[in-house]
Amino acid sequence: MEGERDLARLLAALDPRLHSERYSFSTSADARLGDGDFAIVREAEGLTAIRPDPSGEWARISLSVHSSLEAVGLTAALATRLADRGISANVVAALHHDHIFVPWDRREEAMEALRS
């Protein structure tokens, strides 16, 4: 199954899930994922690791809907909902789901915005 592309159906089926762990974004010299690490992103400037961190400043919200990588407008719609409330959003798209990292202290407000 390649995922949903229709924006209206995607928004109706978001079903956002808030993870209980705090996360941090940091530079890394190691390109391997460690136990519990969420992602390693390779950029021209180096590696960025996204991993659980008890002192992390980010919360991860995963969308349960299986979105296609070719879906148009989902990231924009979600970013707009959060931006309207002044909440920053860092989106990581994967093959089956999108994950949004929001400031830890605004996680419940972000969930409310995504559910609306």
Image: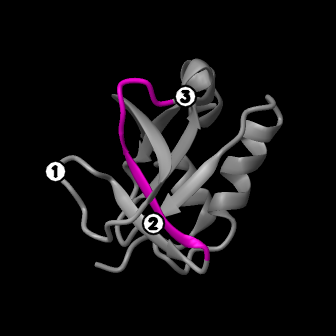
Amino acid marked by disc 2:
Ser
| Span shown in magenta | 45-56
Q: How many marks?
A: 3
Farthest residue to the front: give it: 29
- Amino acid carrying label 1: it is Asp
Along the polypeptide, which appears first: circle 1 or circle 2? 1
Gap between marks 1 and 3 measured at Cα: 27 Å
Residue 37 located left or right of residue 24 = left
**Residue appearing at x 36%, y 33% in the figure:** 53
Q: Residue 63 location in percent, x, y?
A: 43, 48
Q: Is residue 42 left or right of residue 102?
A: left
Residues at marks 2 and 3 touching, judged by CB atoms closer than 8 Å: no
Quarter of the C terminus within the rendering: top right
Percent from the top left, x then y, of residue 80?
78, 47
Q: Residue at x 37, y 49 (%)?
A: 64
Label 3 residue SS? helix
> Dividing the picture into quarters, in which one does residue 44 lie?
bottom right
Side of 25 where 81 appears, left or right? right
2 vs 3, front mark: 3
Which residue is at a point 43% across and 24% down the rendered structure image?
Answer: 55
Q: Which mark is first along the chain, 3 or 1?
A: 1
Which residue does the numbered mark 1 point to in the structure image?
35
Q: Which residue is disc 3 drawn over?
A: 111
C-alpha separation, residue under disc 1 versus residue under disc 2: 26 Å
Q: Is residue 66 visible?
A: no
**Residue with the mark numbered 2:** 67
- Do residues under tags 1 and 3 come within 8 Å of each other at their CB atoms? no
Quarter of the image where the N terminus is located = bottom left
Asked if the stretch drawn in magenta spans residue 16, the answer is no
Counting from the top left corner in percent of width and height, residue 29 is at 38, 65
